[in-house]
Image: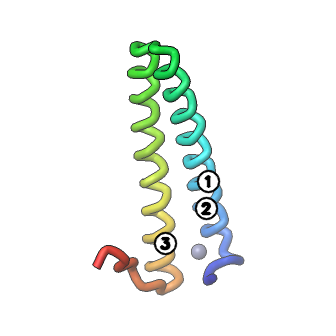
Amino acid sequence: MKGRDCPECTRLWRDYQHATTVHIHLCGKQRIAELQYDHNRAAAIRESVEEAEEERDGAREAIRQHEVEVHGVAPETTCE
Ligand SMILES: [Zn+2]
């Protein structure tokens, strides 16, 4: 894989990993609240889950852009 030694890649991947960890953690908390029929708590956590999701997607997008701009990786075309 390209960019392994790139400090910016390392930083971006660390951000992404952190955002993913936070997201998984919050999803777990939301699920526990739902299992306990604690709907108010589940709804409150869901907002945090959505924020964490946006952060994670943003971090993933930052990696993608960086790879394209700095490392000349072709943009993903997996949806076609
Ligand atoms: Zn890089």
| Ligand 1 image-quadrant field | bottom right
Q: Position of residue 46 (x, y in %)?
A: 41, 29
Q: Nearer the viewer, residue 40 or 74?
A: 40
Cα distance between the residues tagged 2 and 3? 11 Å
Three-letter amino acid code at disc 2? Answer: Trp
Q: Are marks 2 and 1 in contact (CB under 8 Å)?
A: yes
The reply to whether the residue tagged 2 has its Cβ within 8 angstroms of ligand 1 is no
Residue for point 39% across, 21% down: 43
Q: Is residue 17 above or below residue 72?
A: above
Three-letter amino acid code at disc 3? Answer: His
Residue for point 56% across, 49% down: 20
Q: Nearer the viewer, mark 3 or mark 1?
A: 1
Q: How many marks?
A: 3
> The N terminus appears in which quarter of the rendering?
bottom right
Q: Position of residue 5 (x, y in %)?
A: 71, 77
The residue singled out by tag 1 in the image is: 17
Residue for point 67% across, 69% down: 7
> The C terminus appears in which quarter of the rendering?
bottom left
The reply to whether the residue tagged 3 has its Cβ within 8 angstroms of ligand 1 is yes
The residue singled out by tag 2 in the image is: 13
- In terms of image quadrants, where is residue 24? top right
Residue for point 44% across, 44% down: 53
SS at mark 3 in the image: helix
Using the image, tell me which numbered label, if any, was put on residue 66: 3
